[in-house]
Image: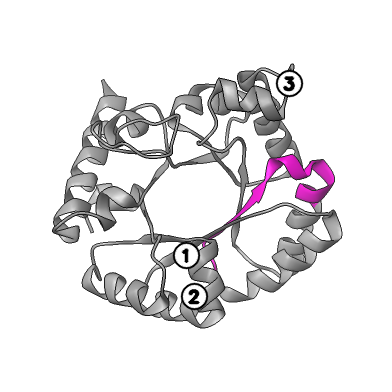
Amino acid sequence: MRKGLEHLILALDVERPDEGKELLSSLRGGLKYVKIGYQLYARGGAPFLREAREMGLSIFLDLKLHDIPNTVSQAVEALAEHGLWALTLHCAGGRRMLEEARRARDKCGSDMSLLGVTVLTSFDEASWEEVAPGCPLPEALGRRATLCKEAGMDGLVCSPLDLAAVRSSAPGLFTVVPGVRPRSADDDQARVATPREAIASGADYIVVGRPILGAPDRGEAVERMALEIEEGLECRKI
């Protein structure tokens, strides 16, 4: 497997499990990581997770758990049974929620990574001010990243434009970066970067969906992303 693919996570944002299985089968051998979100998990559940794992894929389940500590702890314990590579929790749930999630994971003896979601990439400064008046977005990012490190999370999910602030606030945690798009893309993400820019800025993994799913040749799109990632890795050495 080429080096770039070790840093690429496909966002499998499709409507139906059969569509997801067909797509993953067509890319078999060309992917290592796949992200499964609300819609596909709601329709495919544990059986779909098992089928994806049987294809040799590492599963990133993006549910952004955010509830009272006991509820999240129970959810983590149940989800740890599925052999996931990573699971997301929303930092807004607070310190105790994050700590209880870590304890539940450790109690199971699971090696599943727990990732804290800092601020959704759909937020810009104006929309953030509506939900957190008086708290600048950069300050919230730094505080949430620090909280995740102190609570024992393994990694962070953040915008590519927030990488520098997050990495300085939580050194040692790996970073998963959505909002990665070709420069011509136009969608609902507010804080974005190209694959090369994100990797060069220090992202450990990038999450890409629509630029691959909507491509005429998805295999070629994956290869193109891998090439851009490798270019970004080379930029780190300069």
* Residue 202: percent from left, percent from top: 41, 30
Tell which circle, 3 or 2, labels the residue nearer the N-terminal end: 2
Would you call the spot at circle 1 few (<14 residues within 10 Å), some (14-19), or many (20 or more)? Answer: many
Would you call the spot at circle 2 few (<14 residues within 10 Å), some (14-19), or many (20 or more)? Answer: many
- The reply to whether the magenta stretch includes residue 90 is yes
Tell which circle, 2 or 1, labels the residue nearer the N-terminal end: 2
Three-letter amino acid code at the position of disc 3: Pro
Q: In the image, what residue occupies the spot 75% across and 56% down?
A: 101
Say whether residue 83 is visible.
Answer: no
Q: Is residue 151 above or below residue 31?
A: above
Mark 3 or 1, closer to the camera: 3
Mark 3 or 2, closer to the camera: 3
**Circle 3 is placed at which residue position?**
133
Q: Which mark is residue 49?
A: 2
Looking at the picture, tell me which residue is in the foreground, 100 or 122: 122
* Residue 222: percent from left, percent from top: 22, 53
Q: In the image, what residue occupies the spot 24% across and 55% down?
A: 214
* Residue 17: percent from left, percent from top: 41, 76
**Circle 1 is placed at which residue position?**
59
**Real-space CA distance between mark 3 and mark 2, rounded to the nearest whole angstrom:** 39 Å
Picture quarter with the C terminus: top left
Looking at the picture, tell me which residue is in the foreground, 46 or 15: 15
* Residue 16: percent from left, percent from top: 41, 74
**The quarter of the displayed image where residue 127 is located:** top right
SS type, badge 2: helix
Q: Which residues are magenta?
A: 84-99
